[in-house]
């Protein structure tokens, strides 16, 4: 079995497969936890890590039931760099076969029974009976012309790298609020634009709205007087100006910051899965592709009905489904 990606989804399913007596190889185009190593330096987990409780539940950010980022890292909201260390600890515990710096170039699924999946990489070819896509989403951001992103391997590895002044953030979900909070902490003024106005919604499931951690931050932002929230669509975006239905915002300090999310159909997953109108991959009740047999999905884009398994503590629930 081949697993594409050695982040929390890939290592989590890899560890369970090994415990189940199934051989697997993980192909990682960067380093283990590469997405987290590419986070802006200031960004931390929104879900808290907690060592344990009397209900027998694992640490929220753990990818195995018997490990704990809180205990290993001694922090509640780890940075990306610290969480990558936790992932390497899991790798060392299970002694998984991870091929780092191996870029998957093409995947040819099996078209009939008895055939194997063919995988072409820059380090040679592989074949397998089953493939698990655990490529995540961080490296496939949506793209808006005339905008920038922080992290993602760009020249802006930290919000400190941006010029101080006034900024515009396109997108008001978790990433957008993180951007705004970090910039306000540096003394900047920020305008956040999102027609869905997530900062004003109440949702019982953080997959559909802001987490409690981020809502606390929103309260701080509102109290600071340094943030303007615009619940309109950005109609025109240039490197110096953003126009909505009733606002024209000057962004002369630097181009607008894109925080509109990700699109995994831009990756090879676009060839392995069919996608619905919301951009979510179509999968069976066993998390198998509806387009090809023996192609499985783990990670933040797993969804069934109204349930979106977008956080680590949710999608780890599906590891056993794939292993079975």
Image (cartoon, rainbow, N blue to C red):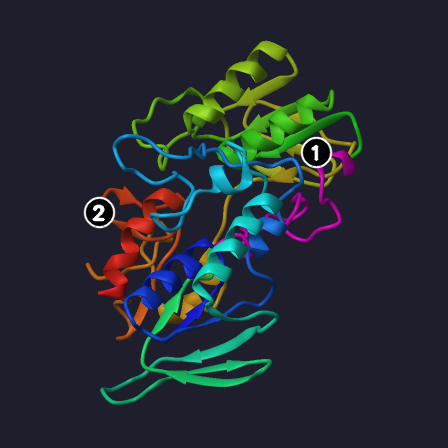
Query: Which residue sits furthest bottom?
Result: 114
Residue 258: percent from left, percent from top: 60, 41
Q: In the figure, is residue 54 to the left or right of 148? A: left
Residue 297: percent from left, percent from top: 34, 62
Give the position of the C terminus as an image quadrant: bottom left
Q: Is residue 190 magenta?
A: no
Q: In the figure, is residue 58 to the left or right of 149? A: left
Residue, x 68% and y 22% (percent of image)?
185
Q: Is residue 147 magenta?
A: yes
Residue that carries the numbered disc 2 in the rendered image: 305
Q: In the figure, is residue 188 to the left or right of 275? A: right
Residue, x 32% and y 83% (percent of image)?
110
10 Å neighbourhood of mark 2: few (<14), some, or many (≥20)? few
Q: Secondary structure at mark 1?
A: strand
Residue, x 73% and y 44% (percent of image)?
156
Task: Please name the predominant secondary structure of the magenta segment in the image.
Answer: loop
Are circles 1 and 2 on residues that touch, CB within 8 Å?
Answer: no
Q: How many marks?
A: 2
Query: 54 or 282, which lies in front?
Result: 54
Query: Which residue sits furthest left?
Result: 285
User: In the rendered image, which quarter is residue 296 located in?
Assistant: bottom left
Residue that carries the numbered disc 1 in the rendered image: 241
10 Å neighbourhood of mark 1: few (<14), some, or many (≥20)? some
Magenta highlight range: 137-161
Query: 312 or 71, which lies in front?
Result: 71
Upstream in sequence: badge 1 or badge 2? 1
């Amino acid at each position: 079995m081949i697993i594409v990606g050695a982040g929390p989804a890939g290592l989590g399913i890899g560890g369970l497969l090994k415990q189940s007596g199934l051989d697997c190889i993980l192909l990682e185009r960067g380093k283990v936890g590469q997405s987290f190593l590419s986070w802006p330096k200031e960004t931390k987990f929104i879900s808290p890590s907690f060592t344990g409780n009397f209900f027998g539940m694992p640490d929220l950010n753990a990818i195995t039931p018997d490990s704990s980022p809180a205990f290993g890292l001694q922090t509640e909201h780890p940075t990306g760099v610290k969480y990558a260390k936790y992932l390497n600890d899991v790798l060392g515990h299970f002694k998984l076969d991870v091929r780092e710096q191996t870029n998957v170039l093409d995947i040819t699924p099996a078209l009939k029974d008895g055939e194997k999946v063919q995988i072409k990489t820059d380090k040679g070819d592989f074949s397998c009976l089953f493939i698990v896509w655990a490529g995540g989403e961080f490296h496939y951001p949506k793209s808006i012309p005339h905008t920038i992103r922080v992290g993602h391997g760009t020249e802006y590895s930290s919000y400190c790298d941006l010029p101080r002044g006034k900024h515009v953030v396109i997108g008001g979900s978790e990433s957008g609020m993180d951007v705004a909070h970090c910039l306000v902490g540096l003394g900047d003024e920020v305008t956040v634009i999102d027609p869905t106005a997530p900062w004003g919604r109440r949702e019982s499931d953080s997959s559909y709205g802001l987490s409690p951690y981020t809502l606390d931050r929103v309260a701080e932002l509102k109290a600071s007087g340094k943030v303007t929230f615009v619940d309109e669509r950005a109609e025109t975006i240039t490197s110096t100006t953003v126009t909505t239905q009733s606002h024209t915002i000057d962004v002369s300090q630097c181009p607008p910051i894109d925080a509109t999310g990700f699109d995994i159909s831009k990756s090879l997953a676009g060839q392995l899965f069919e996608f619905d109108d919301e951009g979510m991959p179509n999968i069976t009740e066993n998390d198998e592709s509806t387009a090809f047999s023996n192609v499985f999905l783990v990670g933040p884009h797993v969804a069934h009905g109204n349930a979106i398994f977008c956080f680590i503590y949710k999608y780890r629930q599906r590891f056993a489904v794939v292993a079975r």
